[in-house]
Amino acid sequence: MTAMRPTTKHAVPAAGDICRMSAVELADRIRRRQLSVREVVAAFLDRIEAVNPRVNAIVSLRDPADILAEADSADAHVARGGEAGSLFGLPIAIKDLALTKGLRTTFGSPIFADFVPGEDDFFVERVRKAGAIIIGKTNVPEFGLGSNTYNSVFGPTLNAFDPALTAGGSSGGAAVALALDMLPVADGSDFGGSLRNPAAYNNVYGFRPSQGLVPAGPDIDVFHAQMGVEGPMGRNLRDIALLLDEQAGYHPRAPLSHHKQGSFLAGLQTPAAGGRIAWLGDLGGHLPVEPGILDLCEAALGRLASASFQSEALVPDVDFEALWQAFVTLRQASSGCALKAHYDDPAKRRLLKPEVVWEVEQALRLTAPQVHAATVRRSSWHKTLLSLFERFDLVALPTAQVFPFAVSTHWPSQVAGRDMDSYHRWMQVSAFATLGGCPALNVPVGFDGKGRPMGMQLIGQPRGDLAVLKAGGAYEATLPWQAGAS
């Protein structure tokens, strides 16, 4: 175990000053005209050119000449006294599961290899309106399934620290681009840990917001699919808050969304006052966890203690296996059913990876009483969490049960000597926040002796997003390293 972060094993140059600046500082300097948008965008494009061929994090990159022309237009706008939004001039690449008007969106699937949407996802529209310059997309697993970012359209994304290891997923491209300073801030999405796991695997922060805080869509189903959410990733907490301020808030076409309470970035100006943390660890041995992970997390809890957050080991009296099966059922009932249209077309079915086919075929076997029983089980877990939050401010868990593994391994078939019965069983630890509709922040906890990164989840009560971010800010101030790999 090492206290200071190692440098990346990729043979890449150190990032320049602009690319190392926080997104908050870059946006501020652009507004003050201390940096031009062209300077900022050109610096990141140069960084992408130098680094991305080695890791394959950013895909569908627009023509740099077109991007720079957009930067020049932004500079002219500011020179005329035009208003600059909170993300004005920042280059951003959108996760390739989100619709981007006029820019190829593949979902990591050969079925959509040439698909160019005619509209934006709601949060993408908001990011544009806030002045960001969308330069391309970030790589994902096919349809976001599995926490290893590879697909047959673009190939694999490699870990930011070690080219032999996975980047995690499904926001793997976003996490690697952040860690190697190719983007100042990034979006992601999370159903079974997709904002948290790749953040842990690349030493950055990933925040799964409360259910409903960031409106999802447009989609053909706006009521049933409740467990996947959009959210921010960043190299620090203030950058996460900056992006979340734009992503969050009610949208009339997303009926389960809700209004945000003020600015998260402004809220972070008031420090956290401390609190109590329930440390669930490996759930009393229920979860198989690779050796070394719990040690890193417990050391991180020790750092939080210096910021007045005291932790207590606890295992709730819950049937965790039944809870996992409820998660699996509800995932099949939403994701599996949503992918059925591709499965029903024999020509498209041949292009689907086995995990997609499995989700659909399992969904086809479900009965309405099974889905109802799963929602009842989920509701019971929500009630358990609420009782926990009467005594504790946060719940903490490891972000992953294994360290980053070989990128050529699609998913771990064993964890700590126990067989995994599905492509996502090894990520069971991420299901608990999802099922509770809770905000969950991955914070980096350091590296093991082999230089492999890991993270820990700080989970708060539903709609307690700012409190979680504040706790993350308190933790961030204790770190002996800075997030980032170069």
Image (cartoon, helix red, strand yellow):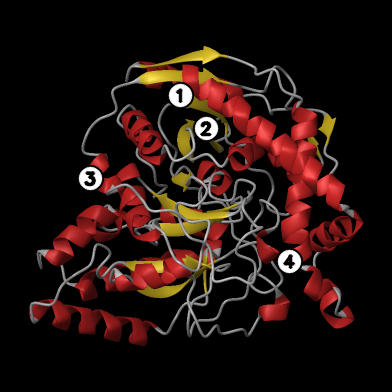
**Three-letter amino acid code of the residue under disc 3:** Ala
Q: Position of residue 139 (x, y in %)?
A: 57, 65
Closest to the camera, between mark 4 and mark 2, is: 4
Nearer to us in this view, 323 or 133 = 323
Image location of residue 317, percent across then percent down: 70, 17
Cβ atoms at labels 3 and 2 below 8 Å apart: no
Q: Which residue is mark 4?
A: 338
Q: Residue at x 54, y 67 (%)?
A: 217
**Distance CA(mark 4)–CA(mark 2):** 31 Å
Amino acid on which the number 1 mark rests in the picture: Ala
Q: Give the amino acid at mark 4.
A: Ala
* Nearer the camera: disc 3 or disc 2: 3
Which residue bears the numbered disc 1? 300
Residue 16 sits in which quadrant? bottom left
Q: Are marks 1 and 2 in contact (CB under 8 Å)?
A: yes
Spatial separation of the CA atoms under disc 3 and disc 1? 26 Å
How dense is the environment of label 3, judged by Cα within 10 Å: few (below 14), some, or many (20 and up)? Answer: few
What separation in Å lies between label 1 and label 2 (alpha carbons)? 8 Å
Answer with left or right where residue 134 lies relative to residue 431: left
Label 2 sits on residue:
456
Q: Amino acid at mark 2?
A: Met
Q: Which residue is mark 3?
A: 266
